[in-house]
């Protein structure tokens, strides 16, 4: 093992050497190897309090999460957010969103609809829209745009400005109280930046509409409405199979119940 690994304090999960510097630590300052720490998906403050058994239980749940994604999770709605998607499975009433702080991008945590309490749409550092469960309508805050990245040309004239967007979700979930997902950025010359920002916010309104729907708020067309459409479509298909004698009445009833989530 190299200069930067610690053989005296092996990982309590797998026994591998742990990093000498900046290792993720659980309770009693027990360090973890980088492979095991990458699999964790929870708030840093919660990791600090984990016992070895608590971590083992969490990693078992993470494996179940991966299996769920592979075998059960079937998003019927994929809405672009940043470089990836907000993926919504309206039948199982669950969704995934890319997280800035979870190292294991192959295994994003699956959240239940009911766990979403509120969201904030953030431009640079300021929330411009906030919507919580039970609110009648999204709360809109005036945008005070202050560019944090400005590119200058060789005459030191400001050339391009960059503006970045993110979404913060507040959750009632054992591992996450808040997750942040980057929601893209735009770059343009000073005079055009506001136009670019507005265009990007327009695109993100698809995401916020879907999140509002997830919280059961109704509102603009989004996740749930088109779920209803695709559910009706699916039931029609199974009805045809029933009428054609391909499936039995019992099989049709079971499938219909499953599709309607009852
Ligand atoms: Zn390990």
Image (cartoon, rainbow, N blue to C red):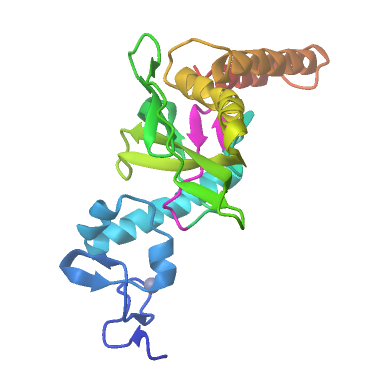
- In screen coordinates, is 123 left or right of 223? left
Which quadrant does ligand 1 occupy? Answer: bottom left
Asked if residue 133 can be seen in this view, the reply is yes
Q: Position of residue 137 (x, y in %)?
A: 40, 11
Asked if the stretch drawn in magenta spans residue 48, the answer is no
Q: Which residues are the magenta region?
A: 86-103
In percent of width and height, residue 29 lies at: 19, 70
Residue 178 x %, y %: 33, 39
At 60% across and 18% down in the image, what residue appears?
227
Magenta-colored segment: predominant secondary structure? loop
Q: Nearer the viewer, residue 227 or 249?
A: 227
Residue at x 38%, y 41% (from the top left corner): 179
For residue 87: magenta?
yes
Q: Is residue 108 visible?
A: no
Q: Quadrant of the N terminus?
A: bottom left
- Give whichever of 40, 202 is nearer the camera: 202
Question: Which of the 4 image quadrants contains residue 193?
Answer: top right
| Residue 140 percent location from the top left of the image | 39, 18
């Amino acid at each position: 093992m190299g200069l930067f690994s610690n053989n005296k304090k092996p990982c309590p999960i797998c026994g591998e050497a742990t990093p000498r510097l900046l290792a993720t630590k659980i309770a009693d300052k027990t360090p973890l190897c980088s492979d095991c720490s990458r699999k964790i998906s929870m708030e840093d403050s919660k990791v600090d309090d984990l016992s070895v058994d608590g971590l083992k239980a969490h990693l078992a749940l993470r494996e179940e999460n991966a299996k769920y994604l592979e075998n059960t999770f079937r998003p019927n709605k994929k809405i672009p957010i940043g470089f990836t998607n907000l993926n919504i499975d309206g039948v199982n009433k669950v969704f995934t969103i890319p997280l800035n702080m979870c190292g294991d991008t192959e295994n994003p945590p699956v959240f239940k609809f009911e766990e979403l309490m509120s969201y904030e749409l953030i431009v640079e550092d300021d929330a411009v829209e906030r919507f919580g469960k039970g609110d009648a309508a999204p709360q809109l805050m005036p945008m005070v745009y202050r560019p944090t990245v400005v590119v200058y040309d060789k005459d030191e004239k400001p050339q391009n400005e960059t503006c970045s967007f993110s979404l913060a979700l507040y959750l009632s979930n054992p591992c996450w109280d808040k997750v942040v997902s980057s929601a893209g950025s735009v770059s343009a010359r000073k005079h055009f930046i506001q136009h670019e920002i507005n265009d990007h916010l327009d695109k993100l309104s698809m995401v916020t509409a879907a999140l509002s729907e997830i919280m059961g708020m109704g509102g603009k067309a989004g996740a749930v409405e088109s779920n209803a459409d695709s559910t009706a479509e699916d039931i029609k298909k199974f009805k045809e199979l029933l009428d054609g004698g391909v499936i039995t009445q019992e099989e049709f009833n079971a499938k219909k119940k499953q599709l309607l989530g009852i």
